[in-house]
Image (cartoon, grey):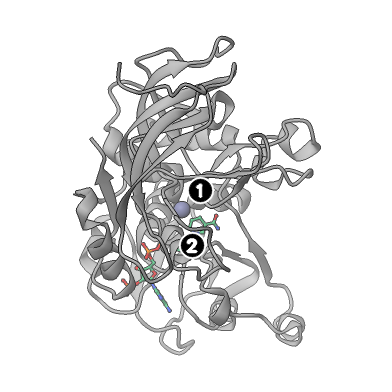
Amino acid sequence: MEFKILDNGRIQSKGYAMLDKNAKFTSFEFSRHAIGEYDILVKILYAGICHSDIHTARSEWGEAVYPCVPGHEIAGEVVAVGSKVSKFKVGDYAGIGCMVNSCGECESCKNSQEQFCEQGKTVFTYNSKDCFHDNENTYGGYSNNIVVSEKFAVCVPKDAPLEKVAPLLCAGITTYSPLKFSNIKEGSKVAIAGFGGLGMMGVKYAVKMGAKVSVFARNENKKQDALNMGVSSFYTSTDENVVKERFDLILSTIPTAYDPLVYINLLKFGGELAIVGLPPYEVCPSINIKDLVFKAGKKVYGSLIGGIAQTQEMLDFSLKHQIYPEIELIKPNEIDKAYENLTSGKAKFRYVIDMR
Ligand code: NDP
Ligand code: ZN
């Protein structure tokens, strides 16, 4: 057997946790709730590192619960299934993103917008209260296994490159979803601000959807990568005199303090600024409504991952068109180094932890 069931039915797990916001990762043993009728147990093979993991583990979005085991870009193999599971069988591959459960009954859940459960019962993959299991804290994918409601796992074909599938579960869906929401199509003019894990996926999807795509970055380090991905302009300035073109959509994946107005200024009339990057709350930018009124005709919206149905759609689209992230596989003892690189401009695109 690839897993151990404890006397009380719980599943033994081990992973990597931060014990406080300044700590280094350390190995951590814990247990997960028993496999319910509709749950699957997934042996985790790969876990992507999202910048949200860093914001959370470092308590940049409010005080985290410690020990904190991040990780919501999970790809692995199903090793056990509950008695009523119909979507998976043992041996299948599964992907798990940012959520593991929700009420399933409200309008949002029925419309597969589970991240907006109207009863407030969305259970996020880590650092979240699991109201379906005595409010226990959830632990994420930097670990050897996870138990999840089958509804919240997506089906991954056995011939998929699993290590590249992992980042799709957050970086993929979080960028695919607003591109769809903004109806990006052949000829749309799209700019992606912040060219890291999410930004790269935004570029690849927008190019595939037929858009003319530009990138806003802080330096020229990854200009060649952008050009290779089909980007037509690469800017390290948001000066309106330097950037002469105007966009239908600017998708901001920026995780640091910045001025959203400089991007609003670069929109066409009727253009949209979609915001997914969420900087530390202490430095979170805001937009003055006076500016929205005087810059009239521009739309600004936020976007939070995407629902489960759309996550499956994104995955199928990615596999069909072979749209995968640029990744660097690392070992679990390299997570601290990866965090350091991601916050000091030394990272390229996505680190994926090889949990095998
Ligand atoms: P990464 O660290 O992989 O990428 C961020 C990129 O933004 C880096 O390339 C970085 O460049 C660049 N950047 C930083 N500051 C600026 C700036 N001022 N102007 C232009 N570019 C800048 O992070 P992720 O892609 O994983 O995540 C991005 C953000 O999205 C995070 O805040 C994360 O929490 C959030 N997020 C939101 C989700 C949602 O549902 N809304 C879901 C997932 C993530 P450099 O290399 O120079 O540092
Ligand atoms: Zn994420």
Q: Position of residue 232 (x, y in %)?
A: 34, 64
- Residue farthest top in this picture: 83
The answer to whether residue 213 is above or below residue 210 is below
Q: Is mark 2 within 8 Å of ligand 1?
A: no
Amino acid, disc 2: Thr
Q: Which residue matches tag 2?
A: 56
The image quarter in which residue 46 lies: top left
Front in this rendered view, residue 79 or 68: 68
The image quarter in which residue 5 lies: top left
Q: Position of residue 44 (x, y in %)?
A: 34, 33
Q: Position of residue 172 (x, y in %)?
A: 44, 46
Give neighbour class at mark 1: few <14, some 14-19, many 20+ (Cα, 10 Å). many
The residue depicted at 60 percent of the width and 72 percent of the height is 268
User: What number of labels is visible?
Assistant: 2
The answer to whether residue 285 is above or below residue 145 is below
Amino acid, disc 1: Tyr
Q: Which residue matches tag 1?
A: 126
Left or right side of 111 for 6 = left
